[in-house]
Image: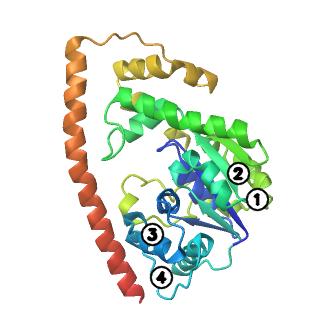
Amino acid sequence: MQQQVFIGGCDRSGTTFSGSLLGGHSSCLCTPESQFKTDVLRRGLEDGDKQLEYIIKHWRFKIWGVKLKNSQALNYDEVINDIVSEYASLVDKKNFNIWVDHTPNNIQNLCLLNQKFPNSKFIHIIRDGRAVAASVIPLDWGPNTIEEAAHFWNEKVSFGLAAEKFFGSDKLLTVHYENIVANPEKVLKKICNFLNIDFQYNMLSGNGFKLPSYTNTQHRLIGSKPSTKRINSWEQNLSKDEIAMFENISKDLLSYLGYRQKKYYYIPSRKDRLFSYCKKVSRSFLNRYRRKKRINNSLKGAESHSENNN
């Protein structure tokens, strides 16, 4: 593995979609989300054996379906290399030069990643926050209300904008999701130029990543070609009141990033606020159950798949 590309951004901004496009390149291997790679570092584990032990027990690693049978890794670099190499064998893409990681929280860990992978490059994906809210609220994790979604988006995007200022354009490329969808060839050529690789038309197919079963439902569009229908679907999925609430919280950041606002007028009543709070609490409890069930089902599926490959 000669180079690492870390794609990051606010969750539901298109990091997986972008990874699937890049993964279509013959030189690129796109792997599942790997929160464990930074979790283990923040645990302060220095010994390779302890790092490997922690990662193997991490549920995010388990859904990769990879078995590290004979790893002799002595340090962090070797542990990660072994994991990525085993995954490459699993998906039959051994002749790759670039590891593409699309974990959303990469954007909050860029300094840490840069320390461990000094030759890596970063891509920050930005998407209209209202589209992010419409996408994330129905899921079994993340913000449960429009207000939470607005603050969630503000925080994550701000990390990326600060990182862009810190690292500079040679190290970090910012890409808007809407531009990828509207003109994928142009944007992919820009990304390829940033990575010093040739553009390949196969990248446009969007099938450069094999989804773990854990994310099949929430990433059901992965594997299909970019469609402009995705850009403004939030307008049908959010109510006027929800749009107004989001814009009231995030209007400045939306403006800075070039997103036009609807400017609907809405002042929540006490009743509205009480309803929002009750919805937040009830969804929080329900989502814990839904997410736990989904993770357990995915782990069983990954174990079954791994056994069939052995």
Quarter of the image for the C terminus: give it. Answer: bottom left
- Residue shown at 28% from the left, 54% from the top: 291
- Which amino acid lies under the numbered mark 3 shown in the image of this protein? Ile
Nearer the camera: disc 2 or disc 4: 4
What SS does tag 1 mark? loop
What SS does tag 3 mark? helix
Nearest the viewer among 81 and 128 is 81
Which disc number belongs to residue 199? 1
Nearer the camera: disc 1 or disc 4: 4
Residue behind mark 2: 188
Nearer the camera: disc 1 or disc 3: 3
Q: Earlier in the sequence, mark 3 or mark 2?
A: 3
**For the image shown, how many numbered marks are present on the structure?**
4
How far separated are the C-alphas under marks 1 and 3?
34 Å
Residue 64, visible in the rendered structure: no
Q: Where is residue 20 drawn, in percent x and y?
A: 57, 59
Residue behind mark 4: 68
Residues at circles 2 and 1 in contact by the CB criterion of under 8 Å: yes
Q: Earlier in the sequence, mark 1 or mark 3?
A: 3
- Which amino acid lies under the numbered mark 2 shown in the image of this protein? Leu
- Residue shown at 36% from the left, 62% from the top: 214
What SS does tag 4 mark? loop
- Which amino acid lies under the numbered mark 1 shown in the image of this protein? Phe
Near mark 3 (Cα within 10 A), the count class, few <14, some 14-19 or many ≥20, is: many
For residue 3, side relative to residue 243 (left or right): right
Q: Where is residue 213 drawn, in percent x and y?
A: 37, 65
How far separated are the C-alphas under marks 3 and 4?
11 Å
Residues at circles 2 and 4 in contact by the CB criterion of under 8 Å: no
Location of residue 180 (image quadrant): top right
Q: Earlier in the sequence, mark 2 or mark 1?
A: 2
